[in-house]
Amino acid sequence: MAVEGIDPANPTGSAARIEFQRHQEALASALAEKAAQKVAATDKEAITKSDTEALKDRQESTGTLDLYV
């Protein structure tokens, strides 16, 4: 999904256009924040899965258990 910008607000332009631009910038900021959160969650999930698989492999290959306290 793309967000297209409009020209910078013109001081002689209409109040409606300025208000539209404010809402558009707020929406773009909110979308960027949500996208960043999704990327962070995906990265965390991938790291956790990788760590869990590495632990399982290590336990199977050494025949020992790693205990976390």
Image: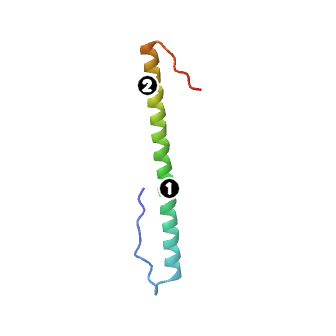
Residue 55 location (% of width, % of height)? 46, 23
In the picture of the structure, the residue carrying the numbered disc 2 is 54
To which quarter of the image does residue 67 belong?
top right
Which mark, by number, is residue 43?
none
Q: Is residue 9 above or below residue 61?
A: below
Residue at 47% in and 41% down:
42
Q: How many numbered markers are drawn? A: 2
Residue 23 location (% of width, % of height)? 52, 69
Looking at this view, is 58 or 17 the one in front?
58
Disc 1 is placed on an element classified as helix
Residue at 51% in and 63% down:
27
Looking at this view, is 50 or 16 the one in front?
50
Which mark, by number, is residue 33?
1
Q: Quadrant of the C terminus?
A: top right
Q: Residue furthest right?
A: 69
Looking at this view, is 25 or 37 the one in front?
37
Residue at 50% in and 77% down:
18
Residue 12 location (% of width, % of height)? 46, 87
Q: What amino acid does circle 2 point to?
A: Ala
Looking at this view, is 31 or 66 the one in front?
66
Residue at 47% in and 57% down:
32
